[in-house]
C-alpha cells in the first residue's frame, strides 16, 4: 500500500485514528485494500469478463490478450528459487492458472492439465501458477503425485504475475482461473479466461493451440 493512500485515508478519518489503525483495517479487509491500490496505481478494473455463479468478479487490468508480448515476470518454485518467464523465451509454454490448489476445482484442473501433457509436444513447458505458498504447492504436488513434467510456481511474493497479466481478482486478491499459451517468440498465442471461475477450463482448444504452434495436427 502506498503511503499516499494511507495519508488520504487518515485525513478522512477522525483525529483519533492512527496509521496503525488504518493498516490493521486494510489487512482485515483485502478487497478494500485492493481497490485502493488499484486506484493509486492508476490501473483499470473490468467486471464483465468473469464471474462465479451469478456473482460478477472484477479483474484488475488491463488484462493481456493474444498477440501481446508475455511480460518478464518472476515467480517462485518449491525451493523459493526465482523462475523468470523471460528465460523461457524460445520454448513453447503453457501456464495453467488457479486461484488455490486447496480447492476441489483447482485440484481437478491441475490433474487434468497434467494428464493432457501426453497429448502435447515433448518439449512443451507446463506450469501451474497460483498464489499459494511454495511449501503448500510442493505438499500438494507430492501428495497428489502430479506428473513431474509439470512445474508448480507461486506468485506469492509481490504478485508480479497477476499484476503484469491483468489476472488478479479484486474481490479475493487471488489469480483468475485461466490458461495461457506462450509461443517461442515470447508472445501470447492463446488465452482462456474461464467465464465461470467455479468451473474448469476447456482443455481441448488449449491442446489444439499447442499443437498448432508446434506445427502438429
Image: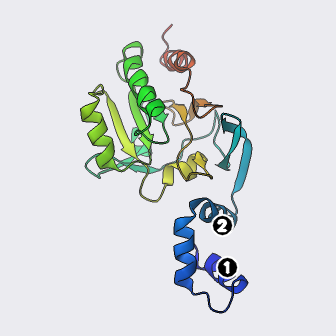
**Residue at (57% x, 28% y) in the render:** 199
Quarter of the figure with residue 195: top right
Residue lying at 40% horizontally and 30% vertically, measured from the top left: 126
Q: Residues within 10 Å of mark 2 (few under 14, many from 20)?
A: some
Q: Is residue 165 left or right of residue 92?
A: right
Determine which residue is flagged by label 2: 36
Task: Look at the image and tell me whether residue 108 can be seen.
Answer: yes
> How far apart are the alpha carbons under marks 1 and 2?
10 Å
Against 60, is 69 above or below? above
Splitting the image into 4 quarters, where does residue 33 fall? bottom right
Residue 8 percent location from the top left of the image:
69, 80
Left or right of 147 in this view: 45: right
The picture quadrant where one finds residue 111 is: top left
Horizontal side, residue 38 vs residue 101: left or right: right
Q: Position of residue 142 (x, y in %)?
A: 24, 34
Which label sits on residue 132?
A: none
The residue under the point 29% across, 35% down is 141
7 to 67, vertically: above or below: below
Residue at the far right in the pictured view: 48
Residue 94 falls left or right of residue 172: left
- In terms of secondary structure, where does tag 1 sit? helix
Picture residue at 57% right of the left edge, 69% below the top: 26
Q: Residues within 10 Å of mark 1 (few under 14, many from 20)?
A: some
Residue 84: horizontal and vertical position, in percent? 40, 47
Q: Nearer the viewer, residue 39 or 18?
A: 18
Q: Which residue is mark 1?
A: 9
Amino acid at each position: 500500500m502506498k503511503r499516499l493512500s494511507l495519508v488520504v485515508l487518515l485525513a478522512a478519518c477522525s483525529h483519533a485514528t492512527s496509521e496503525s489503525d488504518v493498516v490493521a483495517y486494510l489487512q482485515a479487509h483485502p478487497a478494500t485494500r485492493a481497490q485502493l491500490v488499484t486506484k493509486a496505481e492508476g490501473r483499470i478494473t473490468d467486471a464483465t469478463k468473469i464471474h462465479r455463479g451469478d456473482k460478477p468478479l472484477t479483474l484488475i487490468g488491463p488484462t493481456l490478450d493474444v498477440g501481446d508480448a508475455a511480460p518478464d515476470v518472476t515467480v517462485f518454485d518449491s525451493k523459493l528459487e526465482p523462475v523468470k518467464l523471460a528465460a523461457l523465451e524460445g520454448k513453447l509454454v503453457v501456464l495453467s492458472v488457479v486461484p488455490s490448489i486447496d480447492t476441489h476445482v483447482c485440484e481437478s484442473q491441475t490433474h487434468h492439465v497434467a494428464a493432457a501433457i501426453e497429448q502435447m509436444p515433448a518439449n512443451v513447458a507446463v506450469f501451474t501458477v497460483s498464489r499459494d505458498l511454495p511449501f503448500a504447492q510442493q505438499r500438494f504436488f507430492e501428495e497428489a503425485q502430479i506428473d513431474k513434467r509439470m512445474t508448480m510456481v507461486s506468485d506469492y511474493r509481490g504478485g508480479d504475475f497477476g499484476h503484469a497479466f491483468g489476472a488478479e481478482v479484486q474481490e479475493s486478491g487471488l489469480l483468475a482461473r485461466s490458461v495461457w499459451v506462450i509461443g517461442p517468440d515470447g508472445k501470447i498465442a492463446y488465452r482462456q479466461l474461464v467465464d465461470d471461475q467455479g468451473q474448469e477450463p476447456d482443455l481441448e482448444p488449449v491442446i489444439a493451440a499447442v499443437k498448432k504452434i508446434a506445427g502438429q495436427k
